[in-house]
Amino acid sequence: MADGYKPVVRLSELELHEHAKGKFARASASIAQHLRLSRLPAQYVEVPPGKSFCPFHVHMHQDEMFIILSGSGEYRFGDETYPVQAGDVLGAPMGGVEYAHQLWNTGEEPLKYIAISSATDADVCLYPDSGKFAVFNENPLLPENRQFGFMGRMEMDLDYYDGEAGADE
């Protein structure tokens, strides 16, 4: 095509972006961005041994699916833990804490997988282990367009009229 678009992405040629904080670490790259799939967020992820991509969480408005390409790990889902390996496909439906999930690399080599999520304009995430929640509007493919994001704890709950002019009259 004249604008350089190619409908094929070779995972081995993606430029991975690394992030690490304590027991959380990953190298990842957007697949969907390269393929111009604006409503089908997908990324390639590598997690080093002994690490997890992110904390135990659940999305209220986003389904997620993980396709394990290589390596092995444990998939914590609700109250259960499942061993996973290359060839497994994992589901994480949106909903309540019974669908909270976290993928750990328990193997000796990097855990490599593709993460696909449903596209939403906004989401709420709950983090049952820490009592946190996050509210944000963000297209995962265009984080520079983020207009709002907030992370807090449930005990910060305010009255609907708190701080509103005229509420105390």
Image (spheres, helix red, strand yellow):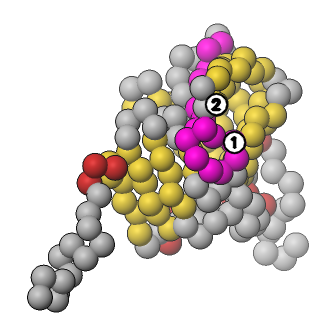
Determine which residue is flagged by label 1. 92
Picture coordinates of residue 89, whole percent (x, y): 81, 34
Q: Secondary structure at mark 1?
A: strand
Picture coordinates of residue 38, whole percent (x, y): 71, 68
Q: Residue furthest top?
A: 108
Start-end of magenta stretch:
92-107
Tell me: residue 162, above or below residue 77: below
Closest to the observer: 87 or 36? 87
The residue lying at 58 percent from left, 55 percent from top is 60
Q: Secondary structure at mark 2?
A: strand
Disc 1 or 2, which lies upstream in sequence? 2
Picture coordinates of residue 76, whole percent (x, y): 62, 26
Amino acid on which disc 2 is placed: Phe
Which image quadrant: the C terminus?
A: bottom left
Determine which residue is flagged by label 2. 77
62 left or right of 116 in image? left
Q: Is residue 97 visible?
A: yes
Tell me: residue 151, above or below residue 82: below
Amino acid on which disc 1 is placed: Ala
Q: Dividing the picture into quarters, in which one does residue 88 lie?
A: top right
64 left or right of 143 in image? right
